[in-house]
Image (cartoon, rainbow, N blue to C red):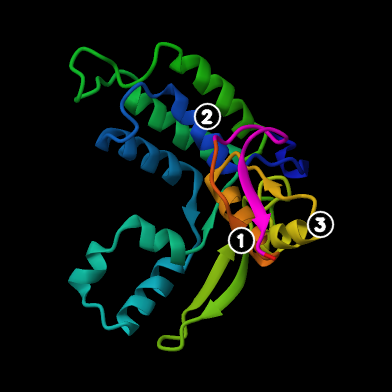
Amino acid sequence: MADWAEGRVKYDIRHWMANWAAMVSADKSSYLFRVFMSYTSDAIYKMLPGEADRVRSHMAGLRMDAAHIGRVGRRYWRRRARYACPDPATIVRGLYDVFLFFREMEDPERPGHRFFTSDADHIFLKEIAYVQQGYLSDPPGLNMYVRVGMSMRTGFIYFRSLRSTCVPLRPHPQPRTTDRASVLRSGAPSRRTTSTSGRRSTRAREGARARGWRWCGRTSLTLRGTSGRRWTPTR
């Protein structure tokens, strides 16, 4: 962990948390699983100094009373406050506490079954190794947020996190525009559009309509080059 600050390789935290959650045998929709993931998130993300007062001032400016502010959930805070991912030692200590807290616990929804899987120890050691190398920690001295807007009522500044925005993971900034253009460039002979997902199918349909094609039926969605959605020119 001594050289973690010099590293430039980072692990997308959401992907890491999904792999970390593989040690849980309980139903992923259960209340206890949500508590486990909330504790895990709290071990990784630490609110920056002054952020709590900044968000509370914003809520007060929106005329929210003290009782209402006290009932505001995690999601509201996560979207408005800024957080830091501290050094590996701090994160490891927090995750180790979470692991020990749930390690011997039974699943309340399945009496006689443990909350963790039988290979939870192996998963813990595997995932904690990434944390020790600094793959989840913010680079020292680097601001991980950019300003994206301001509330006209309260003057509250909205920020967006720069985490999880690397090129291999982030979506294309204008997928509908590019898909539409790609269909238009494909030319009249390319009258068949095939997709393997509903979202891409919708984009393909929009691009086909932009070229003046009409819907002429649907067959099973398969790989490119076989039967799929078919379009024919309207003129």
Instruction: Judge depth for marks 1 and 2 and give the one in front.
Output: 1
Please tell me how crowded label 3 is: few (under 14), some (14-19), or many (20+) other residues with Cα within 10 Å.
Answer: few
Q: Earlier in the sequence, mark 3 or mark 1?
A: 3
Image height of 18 relative to 85, above or below? above
Q: Residue at x 60, y 59 (%)?
A: 214
Secondary structure at badge 3 equals: loop
Judging by the rendered image, the residue that carries numbered circle 1 is 206
Judging by the rendered image, the residue that carries numbered circle 3 is 187
Judge by depth and name the residue closer to the eye, 193 or 121. Answer: 193
**Mark 1–mark 2 CB contact (< 8 Å):** no
Question: Rounded to the nearest whole Å, what is the CA distance between mark 2 and mark 3?
Answer: 44 Å
Secondary structure at badge 1 equals: helix
Residue 5 on the magenta span: no
**Mark 2–mark 3 CB contact (< 8 Å):** no
Amino acid on which disc 2 is placed: Asn
Q: Quadrant of residue 227?
A: top right
Q: Quadrant of residue 75?
A: bottom left
Q: Which mark is residue 19?
A: 2
Residue 233 on the magenta span: yes
Magenta span of residues: 220-234
